Image: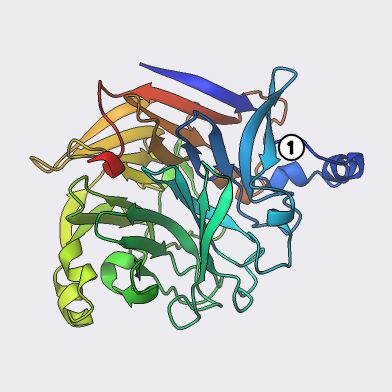
Amino acid sequence: MYKIICHWSRLDWHFPQTVMKEEFETKQIWKKAIPASVKVDHQGQYYVSVPRWSPDIPATMNRIVVKEDKPLLEAFPSWAWNEVGDITTLQSVLGFEIDEYNRMWLLDQGKIAFEPSPDGSQKLVIWDLNSNSLVDAIVIPDEIAPYRTSFLNDLVVDNKNGFVYITDSGCGYPDHPLRGGIIVYNMKTKSFRRVLDRQFSTQDFPDFHFQIDYKPVFKNKPLRIGVGGIALSGDRSTLYYCQLTGRNLYAVHTKLLRNEQIPLEQINSSVQVLGSKGTTTDGMHADNRGNLFYTMLEGKGIGFFDARDRSFHKFVSDDRMLWVDGVAFDQKGSIIFNNNRLHEMVEDHEIDWNNPYNLIIWKAYVGKDVKSYLYG
């Protein structure tokens, strides 16, 4: 059973000033506004990230508000916190997480429109949703995520052991060799370590091409994106991940990643190839029962991997689910996910902007007491 939570023909904001609204409409900025990830907090409020792949995006982190029965985006935590050019604020957020303590972990790419990330702009920002206050902001340095090539994609949080795992897709420099990798953040020491740097599982699959609705994706310029989707098992023992241009699912034991004395070579040789999902994938999220849910770009929907017998299954699919990007849990037995037609919007396809179902946030029931890995 699945249903639509809200939908748009194109994104729109609840602007604090009329002049901002006028500029947004006149320049047709909405044509570059792509909702990437969606999450819901403990109070039931929905949040959406809109990465600044265009410098004119009004706000990169947003809360959904309803005005006159219409869903709009509102800058979160404030408009000031979304100021372009101020590296101490949010510059471009793609992946984020809301943990079991109702804290939001925001992964700031730093880069605007694929320009190099200014020094200090790449960061991990922690925001307490209960008190609506900043907890911490930790800069991710160039030697961990190179400012030119980095493309900080997504993250998972392990508060029990005190670690955060981040994917760097390594595609931040178009027409340049990829440099994919995984970044491990130690909460106790506030230090970062880069692992699986340019290892085969974090790079794009060689000469990979795929189609959606029998149409080549990025036919004029083949898409090359390294590791993007990431998930953590409910017992915190296994880190799952996948490259976007590829169909395989990979895993590595987190005990290897939590021990900084383990040589990088040993981590490289410990990667497990779990098999093909049968589809390209953008976002992933594990539950508290041993299942891993992943978006199906080619399959137009959501699939899941059962870790108990290492089997892949289709969960839900709909022809309107064009480029399902992020997936998460509402902690009430359902997953939430969004589709954004990214492949068509980025390639400037002819899109019917009057279609009220171009961009959709969905909810699908999984089962009683099924929650995020955070509650495992």
Where residue 39 sits in the image (x, y, percent)? 47, 38
Residue 13 vs residue 103: left or right? Answer: right
Q: Secondary structure at mark 1?
A: loop
Which residue is farthest left?
309
Query: Which quadrant would residue 262 be assigned to in this image?
Result: bottom left
Quadrant hosting residue 360: top right
Q: Position of residue 218 (x, y in %)?
A: 53, 53
User: Is 171 located above or below residue 356 in the figure?
Assistant: below
Residue 257 in percent (x, y) is at 23, 69
Circle 1 Cα neighbour tier, 10 Å, few/some/many (<14 / 14–19 / ≥20)? many
x 39%, y 44%: residue: 101
Tell me: residue 284, above or below residue 56.
above
Q: How is the image coloured?
A: rainbow
| Above or below 113: residue 10 | above
Camera sees residue 229: no
- In the rendered image, the quadrant that contains the N terminus is top left
Q: Is residue 1 left or right of residue 219?
A: left
Residue at figure coordinates x 46%, y 75% from the top left? 145
Identify the residue under disc 1: 13
Q: Nearer the viewer, residue 100 or 22?
A: 100
**What is the three-letter code of the residue carrying label 1?**
Trp
Classify 220 as above or below 178.
above
- Is residue 373 at all visible to an observer of this figure? yes
Residue 272 as seen in the image, left or right of residue 99: left
Quadrant of the image containing the C terminus: top left
